[in-house]
Image (cartoon, helix red, strand yellow):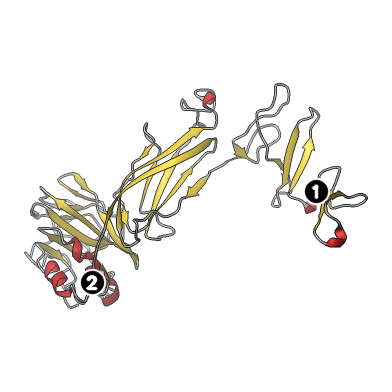
Amino acid sequence: MSNNTTSNQMGLAYEHGVGFSENDGFFPTPETQTGLVKIIDTNDMPHLLILDMYDGKFYDVTTRDGPIGSNIKKYFKDKVNIDGSGGYDISPEVMFREDTGIYEKYLINHQASRFYVRPDFETNRGISGFDYNGYISGTVFTAEVFVDGEPNVATASSEQLDISNEINYDKSIEGHRIQTKFSSNNSGFRLLGRQQDYVVKNISYNPSGVSDFENYQQDLSTPSLWYTRSTLLDTDIVSGVKMLGANSNLPLENLGSVSGPDGKAGSAPLFDSSVYIPVLLPDHSFIMFWSNDTPDVSSMGNTINFLTFGSRYMGWNLYYMYNLTGINNLQFNNSGVQLFDIRVYSDSIYQALPYYYNDVIKNNANNVCPVF
């Protein structure tokens, strides 16, 4: 290793001696052979410099608030110019390990998340460039959740902490494995810890579906509403009620079709506007469907938040919600949404979802949907 004036080496072989020794004469120069360079400025203040391989410039990586008259100032940006101008915001992020139940087969339902952060200096509260909490002005904290190993697309996200440091996600979260990423658009803070609460559900079912085949078939066979693959994709095969367009009183226009998660061409409808289903649903309803997009569903102006089951497959997710009461219509507000196999039951059939999900993705839905 070396700095501006001396170079030291550590002997590793017998003929090199033992421990550190100082070189004399020629030795590797810091610019090309070392990562860190220590210098002493005219005020006898030490600095550690690194050489950036991309722009060929040295940067001080030990910025701090020095003694009065030292002209040393702490910066919360990267690659600030010598005069203190310029620089890039530092955007830190951390990906925590996956959370699971005692066994990975258990489902965990997210209840609450809290992240405990502090500004780098509490004394910065309210001074120029900082907010009333002491964080750099404009700082936003973001938490994202990734379910069942999905590496790129977050299932839910939230920006900014509330007064209790609690994160409120934009949708319900459930899965076998839940992984959280915490990030910010600025530095100048410390993340002290996190607290994430879950309800764990033990789902016991035979993965092969053989012994419970008949029970699952019976559970799935009595929907009160069922828009599924057929020659009339916009018609409920139970009651004959047709879906309506965006203004809730005219038929759908330009109804297209795409391949659903069953892999069969034309099995799923493609809508170019929002969709309205004018039906009165039974109390304690259980609703399920596949969608290529996060569903924006409401009834009488009230949003219905859905849970996801299983992993994303061929661009589709299976969504469900249970114990819904007082629903007299369904409005799918996503324009251009693709839906597959919309079902409503008068009671929960959650126990049949593993069988149903596996049949759709592994058996082209041949046991759970009409022949197509």
Please, is residue 363 above or below residue 28 in the view? below
For mark 2, what is the residue? 267
Left-right relation of 137 to 16: left
Number of numbered discs: 2
Task: Locate residue 118, reporting x and y percent.
Answer: 48, 33
For mark 1, what is the residue? 30
Please, is residue 237 above or below residue 22 in the view? below
Residue nearest the viewer, comparing 357 with 316: 357
Left-right relation of 291 to 302: right
Task: Identify the residue shown where x is 79% and y is 50%.
Answer: 1
Task: Identify the residue shown where x is 46% and y is 50%.
Answer: 96
Q: Is residue 268 visible?
A: no
Picture disc at residue 266: none
Q: Amino acid at mark 1?
A: Pro
Crowdedness near tag 1: few (<14), some (14–19) or many (≥20) residues, C-alpha within 10 Å: some
Asked which secondary structure carries label 2, the reply is loop
Q: Is residue 112 visible?
A: yes
Which comes before the other along the chain, label 1 or label 2?
1
Q: Amino acid at mark 2?
A: Ser
Left-right relation of 66 to 4: left
Task: Identify the residue shown where x is 29% and y is 75%.
Answer: 362
Residue nearest the viewer, comparing 78 with 285: 285
Task: Locate residue 321, reporting x and y percent.
Answer: 20, 54
Task: Identify the residue shown where x is 91% and y is 52%.
Answer: 26
Task: Locate residue 104, reporting x and y percent.
Answer: 35, 61
